[in-house]
Image (tube, rainbow, N blue to C red):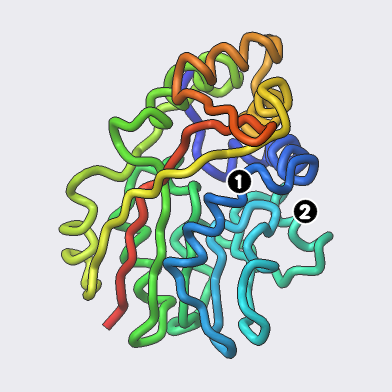
Amino acid sequence: MAAEGYRELFDERGGSYDDAMARWPEARAEELAFVVRLAEVRAGERVLDLPAGGGYLGDLLPAGASVTAVEPSAAFAERSRARGLEVVASSLDGEALPDGEADVLVSIAGIHHEPDHAALLRGWRRVLAPGGRLVLADVAAGSAPARFLDGFVGAHNGHGHAGTYLGDELAEQAEACGYTEVRVIDGTYRWWAPSLEELAAFCAGLFGLRGVSVGEVAEALAEGPGVDHEDGRTGLRWGLRALVATSP
């Protein structure tokens, strides 16, 4: 079955994704912290969270920074509004946003569902103010997470999965789209849950897995990206590739 685009996919399974994030709010804490550190948001800055999912970024930013959730999926937008966030419905390139809208744009693990990353980078440069910062974090091409997503997840989520991941040409691509001060950082961390079974249940909800048992998901996690047991918890080995760049 062919993979669907971001909006279509999460209009259908955004609720399941958000339910998993709500039930295990600490599961991806290290991932979000990795991105927030790179963003270096300061009080008074305007931040775009794009795509925002259910709105997981806002509470991690410093007091005085304003965050707008930008979201193509109606299901996710509804969840963000229910949390009291300002939400703008827009395509992933920020088409609905005015020029120079933000000081910082953060994009976490959404654009691998779309094929034309250069178009997104150009759109984001338009909505960033001069000197504004982009922090894009997504799955790296050829990585263990990419193989797991296109393999096990794609086989069991009812939609397929064939991601367009961030490759070794990422820095050059950003520079070709007009960005400066470009850096690429590969993050390494864990998704944590109290047990392997709960970690598997979290992933089953997050990825919308169907027709597969929690035990089978647990086995796939251990055999795929791999898991670690530490201090009474179980962690899935994960990591995103981050692009940090400036709009001149």
Position of residue 111 relative to residue 81, above or below, is: above
- Residue 16 higher or lower than 209, as above or below: below
Of the two numbered discs 1 and 2 on the same chain, state the one appearing first in sequence. Answer: 1
Nearer to us in this view, 123 or 183: 183
The residue beneath circle 2 is 79
Q: Is residue 137 left or right of residue 143?
A: right
Question: In what element is the residue under mark 1?
Answer: loop
Count residues near mark 1 (Cα–Cα under 10 Å), then give few for <14, some for 14-19, many for 20+.
many
Residue under label 1, please give it.
28
For this orientation, the residue located farthest to the front is 231
What amino acid is found at the position of numbered circle 1 in the picture? Arg
At a point 52% along the width and 17% down the height, the residue shown is 222
Place of residue 70 in the rendered image (x, y in percent of width and height, measured from the top left): 59, 64
Residue 25: give x, y in percent of width and height. 73, 47
Name the spot of residue 146 as percent of width and height, x first. Answer: 39, 30
Would you place residue 181 above or below residue 167 in this image? below
Q: Position of residue 45 (x, y in %)?
A: 54, 85
Kind of residue indicated by mark 2: Arg
**Location of the C terminus (image quadrant):** bottom left
Q: Distance between the Cα atoms at labels 1 and 2?
A: 18 Å
Q: What element carries label 2?
A: helix
The total of numbered circles placed on residues is 2
**Residue depicted at 62% across the width and 78% down the height:** 62
